[in-house]
Image (tube, rainbow, N blue to C red):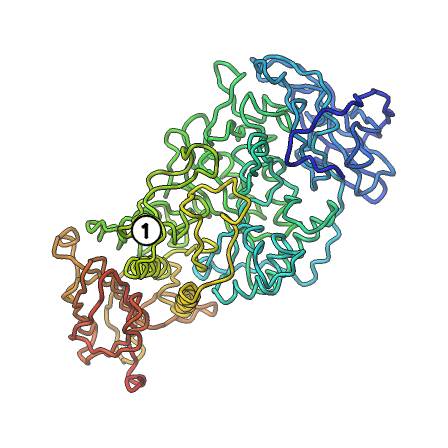
Amino acid sequence: MTDWSHCDVPTPSLTYPGTCRIARAHRGQPSPLGATWDGAGVNFAVASEFATGVTVCLFDCPDDVHESVRVPLREHTDGIWHGYLPGLKPGQLYGLRVSGPYEPHAGHRFNPHKVLLDPHARAIGRGIGWSDAMFGYRVGEDDLSFDDRDNAWCAPLAAVVHNSFDWGHDRPLRTPWHRTLIYETHVKGQTQLHPGVPEPLRGTYAGLASRASIEHLLRLGVTAVELLPVHAHVDDRNLVTHGLRNYWGYNTLSFFAPEPSLSSARCPAGVLTEFQTMVQRLHAAGIEVILDVVYNHTGEGNERGPTLSLRGIDNNSCYRLMPGNRRYYQDFTGCGNTLNMQSPRVLQLIMDSLRYWVQVMHVDGFRFDLASALARELHDVDKLSAFFDIILQDPVLSQVKLIAEPWDLGNGGYQVGNFPQLWSEWNGRYRDTLRRFWAGDRWLMSEVATRLSGSSDLYQPGGRSPRSSINFITAHDGFTLRDLVTYQDKRNHANLEENRDGESHNNNWNCGVEGETDDAAIRELRLRQRRNLLATLLLSQGVPMLRGGDELSMTQAGNNNPYCQDNEISWLRWTLTAEEQQFLEFCQRLTTFWKTQPVLQRSRFFQARWESLPASHHQQQIDQIVWLDQDGVEVLSDRWHSAGLKALGMRLNGDATGEENDLGEPVYGDTLLVILNPQDEPVNFLLPLPQGHNSPELWRIELDTFLGSRGELLTSGTACVVRERTVCVLVRQNPAESHKN
């Protein structure tokens, strides 16, 4: 098979002879859309409101320069072209030719000289071979021109497949949100350099599902992996020309087909099987699979982009076009186009895709890239848009995990806190607040408290809960955790965009020196800052999300937008120094602590409640959470912005969680005292007097990001020395445990 993925392909000397055989299809059915094998043949169904004709083109092998058979779909039912070919089998390669007007000003860009990818294709049989022939207009002229060169020799092709995977006893895990720890990673980057993964499987779905990979996730306490896009995607021509790739995959070609380059399999059916096996093995280990999906735009770009699929099938219906001149595209994504969520066929395409990944591929949820773009009705973001209404009533999709990236690039696109019930959100407010706090902003105590307690200001008014907040410090988009405390400025020159790309305002602090250093004091401060940020994340209410590689002290050398770096800049490095191994062990200890503490895994917001203390015979009103200053005094509203508030204490009462287990029984746990000291000097934090009874309390230091005092026992009314820029966690000891240590 010819590999055309990394270079412009010269036009073959053999031009399309027009001598292929014409086959007549049976009537067939308008549903389901796509190519469906029934054991005796294949039904084809393609939706296009404005097309005047649709032809299925059959190819014998990936190296074919033109189709061997053309099959016109003569039946047309409610905007769907359909036909049935008896005798056709799985493995068949095919594309589409669609006829209709070429009137860019009216939004129509039909060009029957272009072979197109079926939007409902379940598998990719051949990738794109970049050439001027891949464009509907003549490259070098404006987009109003018409290109009549045939692209059959370089167009992406679909493959007919049949799902026959044996799932055995695999069932949805349905891990409760408040017990979910998300690990965001890239399929290839996770294992490409992993020495414990068999070399042929590195960087693949099978590699992610290997024993070595899963064992690492389990040691880290992960309950769900959130995978950067696995939908088949487009490597932009400009990137390919410069030896780069769209590594992240946020440039969708197909909403159904898994990306073949992430598979060790050599045939389309094998790619599907490998993906399904990955999900099955992760489920067996108790790990859910969440997909990062891109339904806001496609890889066809703006009016200057290629004609790959939707543009040539029904451009006028599929994309949001400028009302005054439909030649141009509305772009709320920064990628040239925006899918038209007002189109019933677009909504159907997306919903069919989502249900396919749940029902056929067994994934457990989705993170929606630039989700605000999906909610736009005309111009404004509308949380009651058709898309959300459809999700809410869908018996399949309403039962899986739904995560929004609650912003896009259009006006009014920042919608953190405004998504409807059922939805969780990447909480950008949380990220920004905690970064600024540990970078030195001392006037954020009140907002830090709000973020630590679940961001009730964002989610409670709408009847939502702490699980609505996906808390994160870092993600794929931006600095790694290590780079966040190492670089003040982005260093994206490897992307060949003159360092213009990527976010320039990162709320970060390099600890006084730019870049890597041998200065021992700076290195220790950076390590402590990393421990502070991760500790704060795991001590907050809401759903924590870790960026894959942060636990391994991953660096991208200051590149905060390595979307096109399919190399060691982006791949996780598994050979660790002693210092990095120590940090990994700290991360593992931190997540283990989180998993064992009911007060950190709440499903409801905090409130004052009447609770029965387990060791007492009477009821007392105790607070589920109390905020304290360094003097052990409760912080009331008039003191939150006081210059005298140097350290913040958060007491979480394990005797008053207000939670119940699956049997309806009250849940009790440890009482914790979390102390945050963002100052550049130690603080003597006075441990609070007992709440609810008069006997003294004994506290044990369980976690100290200074790594100096773990295990120390202290009594209420005495001072706990919290070192500079440190998080300290104390656990109240039960009377029976007072003799320990």
What is the quadrant of the C terminus in the image?
Answer: bottom left
Specify whether 312 is left or right of 482.
right
- The N terminus sits in image quarter: top right
Describe residue 82's horizontal placement relative to residue 134 as left or right: right
Mark 1, residue position = 455
Q: Is residue 709 left or right of residue 667?
A: left
Q: Amino acid at mark 1?
A: Ser
Question: In front here: 539 or 416?
Answer: 539
430 or 562, nearer to the observer: 562
- Residue 221: give x, y in percent of width and height: 48, 65
User: How far across and down, in percent of the image, does residue 246 sit?
Assistant: 55, 38
- In front: 220, or 180? 220
Q: Secondary structure beneath disc 1?
A: loop
Residue 583: in sight, yes or no?
yes
Q: Quadrant of residue 313?
A: top right
Q: Callout 1 environment at 10 Å: few (<14), some (14 to 19), or many (20+)?
A: many
Q: Is residue 590 above or below residue 367?
A: below
Q: Is residue 390 left or right of residue 639?
A: right
* Nearer-the-camera pick, 251 or 649: 251
Residue positioned 45% across, 55% down in the render? 554
